[in-house]
């Protein structure tokens, strides 16, 4: 009897140790999405990067990752999720070394793309390993809640970690810090993770990932060029055609495959659909607010990178407890109160952030805390809703969709909101006499001419404050749409998280040639 208790206790410790290991991998991935928010001004100056290169230094990571995630989840089903996690860790560590010592902006962008390949290999594996490690439903929900909280907390901690490292080291340290974590995670995975369980019968389609990546890159390039002044209409046309062609080919191919990377029919499940909406739009809000807030208070309010990081990290104070509470009470409340209620709270938080930007710092900090709590509630349960809505045997696909939802939210926040704030700024800034027209392109370009000219700084401050306000209003509107959409989807949904019965995909498709 005592021996059985000891075995059970040891197995329990091993389960939570596996969670800690995959969480370390996830935390690295999420940190690399936001760690550059405070480091960007420094590395841009050191590398002599242009404004467009600076945006691609940030966006190369989520663009490539989002394009590869769907395929990597299915590939994980085929070769085994433990092996995919190990491959991802190794690639991520090597890419971190390359990024840390990049001599030019172009090499750094390439290193960021390689980081995304490693992250895309790891991310679906983290959820899949949790799903196979935790057999008890309540434990599994808590584990998913921890996983979901790290998505928010990691986004909030990124600017702090970046700012703290820049206080003591050079900008490459924001990448170099990944290497010891990778080494420790590899050792822990070898010792603790469940055995690799490949399924060679699973079909993996590289062409689908290529089409998805082409569509996303074209869409991001279109957004960036539309926000650039003056617009390059030839490049915009090419980007639009590439995006439309890539996404169209992706959809057509999924409809022909016996085992597609993405089952479109799964979105008919209201729980799954609401989880995708909550994950993507909550991440859109938190990532967008962090990006524009760190830039504003670092460039125009005189905060150091560390202080700017600490400011936006207030969101983590609300996110972590909310994520854990949401996962713990889900079995009693069902999806709607936690997802829709969390998004409603996020609307209130974003509104407070807007009010605080016009009034006092305490109101702004309170708004960030409330925003973090709302998104924390929504995102922790969104993960459970997405994975719980997957058909049997398609856990890898569901994990990939869940990850794509988060990455798409972060990607569109940087692409759309970063471009929007620059677009509005260039429209409203009143350049003092003597400045070149190129100073209108961004606040960084304007401030480059601000030495010994207070009128230049004042013009930049007024214009960026207007752009900040407009962008926050867009964030509030997007969150309000998410509230309405999830409330409607889940109004007839029972509290049960059981996945709906779905038709096996092989019955309605022929294998693509």
Image: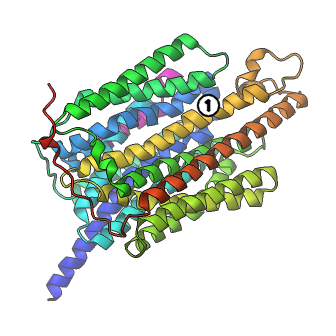
Task: Report the front residue among 480 and 83.
Answer: 480
Dot 1 corresponds to which residue? 419
* Residue 105 forms part of the magenta stretch: yes
Quarter placement of the C terminus: top left
State which quadrant residue 355 falls in: bottom right
Q: Is residue 296 magenta?
A: no
Q: Residue at x 54, y 44 (%)?
A: 34
The coloring applied to the image is rainbow
- Can you give x and y, in whole percent of width and height, for residue 175 in the image? 48, 39
Residue furthest left in the image: 201
Question: Residue at 35% across / 65% down in the picture?
Answer: 143
Residue placed at 37% from the left, 41% from the top? Answer: 119
Above or below for 36 versus 496: above
Pick the residue in front: 265 or 479: 265
Q: Give the percent coordinates (x, y) of residue 28.
A: 43, 48
Point out the stretch of residues depicted in magenta.
88-108
Between 102 and 122, the one lying in front of the other is: 122
Q: Position of 297 compared to 103: left or right?
A: right
């Amino acid at each position: 009897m005592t021996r059985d208790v000891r075995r059970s206790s040891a197995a329990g410790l091993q389960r939570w140790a596996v969670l800690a290991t995959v969480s370390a991998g996830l935390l690295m991935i999420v940190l690399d999405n936001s760690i550059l928010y405070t480091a960007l001004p420094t590395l841009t100056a050191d590398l002599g990067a242009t404004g467009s290169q600076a945006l691609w230094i940030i966006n190369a990571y989520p663009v490539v990752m989002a394009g590869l995630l769907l395929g990597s989840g299915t590939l994980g089903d085929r070769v085994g999720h433990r092996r995919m996690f190990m491959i991802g860790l190794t690639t991520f560590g090597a890419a971190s070394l390359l990024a840390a010592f990049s001599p030019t902006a172009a090499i750094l962008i390439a290193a960021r793309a390689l980081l995304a390949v490693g992250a895309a290999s790891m991310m679906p594996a983290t959820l899949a390993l949790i799903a196979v490690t935790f057999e008890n439903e309540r434990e599994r929900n808590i584990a998913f809640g921890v996983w979901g909280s790290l998505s928010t907390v990691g986004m909030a901690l990124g600017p702090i970690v970046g700012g703290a490292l820049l206080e003591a080291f050079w900008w490459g340290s924001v990448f170099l810090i990944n290497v010891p974590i990778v080494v420790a995670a590899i050792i822990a995975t070898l010792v603790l993770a469940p055995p690799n369980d490949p399924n060679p019968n699973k079909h993996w389609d590289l062409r689908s990932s290529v089409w998805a990546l082409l569509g996303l890159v074209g869409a991001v390039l279109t957004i960036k060029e539309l926000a650039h002044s003056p617009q390059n209409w030839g490049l915009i046309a090419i980007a639009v055609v590439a995006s439309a062609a890539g996404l169209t080919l992706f959809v057509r191919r999924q409809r022909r495959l016996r085992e597609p990377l993405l089952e479109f029919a799964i979105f008919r499940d209201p729980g799954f659909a609401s989880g995708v909406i909550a994950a993507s739009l909550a991440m859109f809000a938190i990532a967008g607010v962090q990006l524009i807030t760190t830039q504003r208070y670092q460039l125009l309010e005189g905060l150091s990178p560390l202080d700017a990081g600490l400011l936006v990290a207030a969101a983590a104070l609300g996110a972590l407890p909310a994520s854990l509470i949401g996962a713990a009470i889900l079995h009693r409340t069902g999806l709607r109160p936690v997802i829709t209620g969390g998004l409603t709270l996020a609307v209130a938080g974003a509104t407070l952030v807007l009010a605080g930007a016009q009034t006092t710092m305490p109101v702004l900090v309170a708004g960030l805390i409330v925003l973090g709590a709302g998104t924390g509630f929504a995102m922790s349960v969104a993960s459970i809703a997405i994975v719980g809505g997957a058909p049997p045997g398609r856990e890898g696909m569901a994990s990939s969709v869940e990850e794509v939802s988060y990455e798409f939210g972060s990607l569109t926040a940087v692409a759309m909101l970063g471009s929007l704030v620059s677009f509005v700024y260039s429209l409203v800034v009143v350049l003092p006499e003597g400045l070149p027209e190129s100073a209108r392109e961004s606040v960084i370009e304007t401030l480059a001419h601000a030495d010994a000219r207070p009128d230049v700084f004042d013009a930049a401050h007024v214009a960026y404050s207007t752009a900040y306000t407009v962008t926050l209003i867009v964030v509030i509107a997007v969150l309000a749409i998410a509230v309405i959409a999830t409330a409607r989807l889940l109004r007839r949904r029972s509290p049960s998280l059981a996945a709906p019965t779905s038709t096996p995909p092989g019955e309605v498709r022929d294998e693509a040639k």
